């Protein structure tokens, strides 16, 4: 099973996990990391600590957006761990798909599947003209 780490600003990561678990049930092997109260340097240290708690696990990191301290910290980690799988711009459909597929695929295999799922679920709602 692929391990997940959700990283975000404020309470974003916790809210994403809580919401997803209300839909699909409690999920094992998921860590959440907030940037709240951390500089980029200390956030990078925190993420590295979480990664090393189970460094043998196949892991996928989800970021809230492609900028800011969370992304900067992950770029720093990627310099030394180029095989790490990181997706920026996580949304709820993407996270739900991850929970449903993480026992069947590796993190590397999941990346394109999840990016497609996330993009495919960004739509504009319109009323039908009669």
Image (spheres, rainbow, N blue to C red):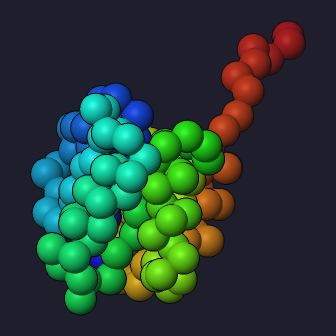
> Up-down: is 46 above or below 106?
above
> Up-down: is 34 above or below 83?
above
Foreground pick, 74 / 114: 74
Q: In which quarter of the image is residue 58?
A: bottom left
Residue at position x 66%, y 38% in the image: 122
Residue at position x 22%, y 66% in the image: 49
Residue 102 in view:
yes
Residue 16 percent across, percent down from the top left: 33, 38
Residue 4 percent across, percent down from the top left: 31, 64
Q: Is residue 41 left or right of residue 116?
A: left
Q: Is residue 90 left or right of residue 98?
A: right
Is the N terminus in the top left, top right, bottom left or bottom right quadrant? Answer: bottom left
Q: In this view, does 14 lie to the left or right of 95?
A: left
Residue 7 percent across, percent down from the top left: 37, 49
Foreground pick, 24 / 72: 72
Residue at position x 51%, y 73% in the image: 78
Residue 23 in view:
no
Residue at position x 46%, y 56% in the image: 73
Is the C terminus in the top left, top right, bottom left or bottom right quadrant? Answer: top right
Foreground pick, 89 / 79: 79
């Amino acid at each position: 099973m692929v391990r997940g780490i959700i990283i975000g600003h404020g309470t974003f990561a916790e809210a994403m996990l809580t919401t997803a678990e209300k839909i699909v049930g409690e999920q094992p092997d998921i860590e959440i990391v907030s940037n709240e109260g951390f500089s980029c340097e200390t956030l990078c240290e925190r993420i590295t600590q979480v990664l090393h708690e189970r460094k043998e696990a196949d892991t996928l990191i989800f970021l809230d957006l492609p900028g800011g301290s969370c992304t900067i910290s992950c770029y720093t980690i990627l310099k030394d761990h180029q095989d790490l799988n990181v997706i920026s711009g996580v949304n709820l459909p993407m996270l739900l798909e991850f929970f449903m597929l993480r026992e069947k695929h590796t993190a590397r295999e999941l990346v394109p599947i999840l990016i497609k799922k996330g993009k495919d679920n960004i739509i504009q709602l319109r009323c039908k003209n009669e």
